[in-house]
Amino acid sequence: MYSRKPFYLIVAALFLVGLALMLHRHFVYEVPWLPGEKRQIWSVEAKVEFEANGRPVKASLAVPGSQPGFTLMNESAASPGYGLSFVQTEGGTRAEWSIRSASGHQELYYKVDMMLDPFAKGPIGNAPPQVTTVEVAEPYATAMDQVLTLAEERSSDNITFTRELLKELNSGGQNAELLAQHKSSGPLLLEMLHRAGVPARLLKGLQLEDGRRRQPLVDVVQVYDGERYEIFNPATGDQGLQENLLLWEYHSAPVLDLVGGSNSRVSFSMLEQEQPVNVALAKKFDQPDWINVSLYNLPLEEQALFKGILLIPIGVLAVVFLRIIVGVKTSGTFMPVLIAMAFIQTSLLTGLVGFLIIVGTGLVLRSYLSHLNLLLVARISAVIIMVIGMIGFFSIVAYQLGLTEGMKITFFPMIILAWTIERMSVLWEEEGPKEVIKQGGGSLVVAVMAFLAMNNELIRHLTFNFLGLQLVVMAAVLVLGNYTGYRLTELKRFKPLADELKHD
């Protein structure tokens, strides 16, 4: 007896591989399950202003990159008359403007689009910096030592030490007030951490708020404890990256280096906007890899083509279910899928009317051809020519009547329509009009059901964004193909038996 185990193993493998690919697309590449989702994009503009003194000018601005919580989408700069380059240095990426000679007030602009992205990752100086200590004058040195001693007694590692140190500095005590006069909160915390031998660096962040203009950067401190690090806000004492805090400079480098000018300053303006998730992710994953099976890497023309092609397996699944499980008879095996594809192009009502007109008229003309006793090839060829002529004629009539929807019947597959007319004509001659109506009506019912499945927004989103769904559909088709029981339409044969049992 033939074993069914290989069959079930193949079905299970197809289902599991397809499901794994879909889950990978969702969790690794962040493709949402539902259509219509959007991603938050922050557009930030940095304005560099300075006074040029008539000599060559070189301005170097630190610019952000992808980092935890944000993904870099686009960046651009406006600098009339200046040369511009984006340079990779040990201190990260920098925008460098240069000009042979400039004088007077100068303005340079840099704009970046950052996507709010909980999955984003990026380097924020993972290597601990060197600890550098400086001589501190009295009475600040004594106040620092007293605060450091208190914090050290209540801590167990560098992270908890920093947390306790911030509590002391923000407590409002005598030492805290004295030290607040020495330096601002960010440089003060960094100096005290280095004095205690704790590796740390000062970062510059931008608090994002929609519609804000001329915003300054704020200080945050990155504290290391072995291989891990933590971010602290010295002004508030908060631990961890704050929500909507974009780290602008995170390599202990100056935000702006200027040669050939004076009175420089940098201010920031920002605006919040939203983009459809497919646009945002297409920009994020613009560099394909072998596991990123995405149609967004193809040209737009091919993407539009595949959007339609990938719907066909859904229509095929609908046909298989309706024919094998329900038992609907159709004229041709997969002709309803092609008709459903035409319905997608024409709209359902226009497609139904056009199909009935063309097939009905074709059957009348085909009945005349049957009296000419033509060979099959010549007869089919004549029917194809008639179908093309009818489509052209009805399109012209529809245009003259102002019915622009009627011109869309040109999307119908002409060869399939010709074969449908031929099959129905032969069926009419052999089994009568009743069987023609049954199979023709069944074909339309299946085509409409396939159209409703294929034209669903959720289905279109899943088929285009999750190619693993094709394997799941394949597994479902194989399972349905293994069904050998009664069709639902055949159960009516048992109705007299059920009535008899009911009376008994």
Image (cartoon, grey):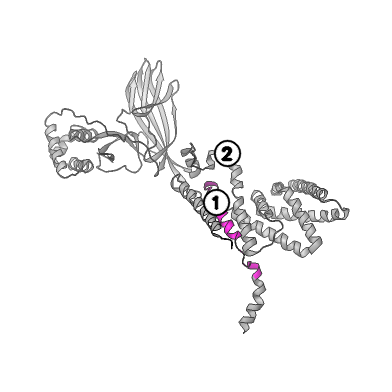
Q: Can you see residue 184?
A: no
Q: Secondary structure at mark 1?
A: helix
Instruction: Spot the residue most to the right.
Output: 372
Q: How many labels, in total? A: 2
Up-down relation of residue 255 to residue 395 (above or below) = above
Does residue 340 appear left or right of residue 56 in this picture? right
Residue plotted at (52% across, 49% down): 468
How many other residues sit within 10 Å of disc 1, few (<14), some (14-19) or many (≥20)? many
How many other residues sit within 10 Å of disc 2, few (<14), some (14-19) or many (≥20)? few
Name which of mark 1 and mark 2 comes first in the sequence. Answer: 2
Q: What's the amino acid at mark 1?
A: Leu
Per the picture, the main secondary structure of the magenta-coloured stretch is helix
What segment carries the magenta color?
A: 462-490
Give the labeled residue for mark 1.
Answer: 471
Along the line of sight, which residue is nearer the eye, 2 or 345? 2
Quadrant of residue 489 in the image? bottom right
Does residue 110 appear left or right of residue 426 in this picture? left
User: Residue 482 location, x and y as percent?
Assistant: 60, 61
Q: Secondary structure at mark 2?
A: helix
Give the labeled residue for mark 2.
Answer: 300
Q: CA distance from mark 1 to mark 2?
A: 24 Å
Location of the C terminus by quadrant is bottom right
Q: Is residue 478 magenta?
A: yes
Does residue 51 appear left or right of residue 426 in this picture? left
Up-down relation of residue 91 to residue 241 (above or below) = above
User: Residue 328 location, x and y as percent?
Assistant: 67, 63
Q: What's the amino acid at mark 2?
A: Leu
